[in-house]
Image (cartoon, grey):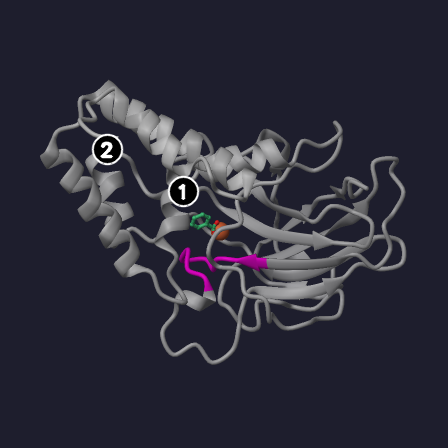
Amino acid sequence: MRNLDEQSITQAVLNQNASAEDCRLREIMTSLVQHLHAFARETKLTEAEWEKGIEFLTAVGQICSPTRQEFILLSDTLGLSTLIIAQNHKKPAGCTEATVFGPFYVSNAPHFELGADISRGLKGTPWFVSGRVLDIDGNPIPNAILEVWQADDSGFYDVQKEGLKEYQGRAVLHADSDGSYHFKTIVPECYPIPHDGPVGKMLQALNRHPWRPAHLHFMITAPGYERLVTHVFREGGEYLDSDAVFGVRSSLIAEWVRHEPGIDPDGNLSDMPYYTLEFDFVLSREAR
Ligand code: BEZ
Ligand code: FE
């Protein structure tokens, strides 16, 4: 294997990889090498451009930390995350669609009783969220676990705040025996994805903004059902058609209903306007 040129190099690499024992790895690496080489040929990539690409990926790696995953942000902003979700979560019509996970989930969120105020003192417009967790036939799924997380009314997640003492705006809840859930929080705002790193620079160079439309995250699990990772977006909100991470699906947009001051769903007198959201989730059965 000598004198490789711009055509013969591809097959030479494939031949070298051919004895990999893991056949899925071999399949993935074969396709990756073919597409990578085709990309370099198609764009007639120069050495300076290749170097710039290496510098970019190096910067993406260097900014990563236990609380900052720039590679996932890169995948999200290139639409790869949405593509992977779409091709791995084909569900029967009527099931709630999945969308991007995002970097702000934590696995040790506080557990709350149904009806609790999960904002834990965040300032903002009160919001009463309720609904049911159902199967595809409309039957309640009792005792499903709902994990919820959200930005505050300035667009920041608790984990982005310095000196964080306790989580705010996130919770683990157990749906009731009739599949219903409800909790109180505050209305979250739109926010820009972390854009002070290489992905932010990439977006700027591409004349793209880093904003996401206002949303509430849910991860719902129940035995026998596929785990659902999704959001509920605000109808009429900004950025629904230009989400920086391509996560919006029409079926996940719902009305966040505004109410004038008065008696709120908890039976208390609210001297400020408050919002309500009612949203049912439909889980698909786990593949056997
Ligand atoms: C989020 O919604 O939390 C998120 C998703 C993708 C990238 C950044 C943030
Ligand atoms: Fe989010």
Q: Which mark is residue 206?
A: 2
Q: Residue at x 31, y 26 (%)?
A: 10
Judged left or right of residue 179, residue 219 is left
Q: Is 259 located above or below residue 151 in the figure?
A: above
Residue 116 rendering spot, x and y as whole percentages: 70, 68
Query: Split into 4 quadrants, where in the image is the N terminus?
Result: top left
Residue 222 rendering spot, x and y as whole percentages: 79, 54
Judged left or right of residue 51, residue 110 is right
Per the model, the C-alpha gap separating discs 1 and 2 is 15 Å
* Amino acid found under the numbered disc labelled 1: Ser
Helix, strand or loop status at disc 1: helix
Query: Split into 4 quadrants, where in the image is the C terminus?
Result: top right
Q: Is residue 82 visible?
A: yes
Mark 2 Cα shell of 10 Å, populated few (<14), some (14-19), many (≥20): few
Main secondary structure along the magenta-highlighted residues: loop
Which residue matches tag 1?
A: 75
Residue 250 rendering spot, x and y as whole percentages: 59, 30
Residue range (magenta): 149-157
Camera-nearest residue between 198 and 266: 198
Camera-nearest residue between 53 and 214: 53
Of the two numbered discs 1 and 2 on the same chain, state the one appearing first in sequence.
1
Farthest left residue?
Answer: 48
* Amino acid found under the numbered disc labelled 2: Leu
Mark 1 Cα shell of 10 Å, populated few (<14), some (14-19), many (≥20): some
Residue 45 sits in quarter: top left
Disc 1: residue Cβ within 8 A of ligand 1's nearest atom: no
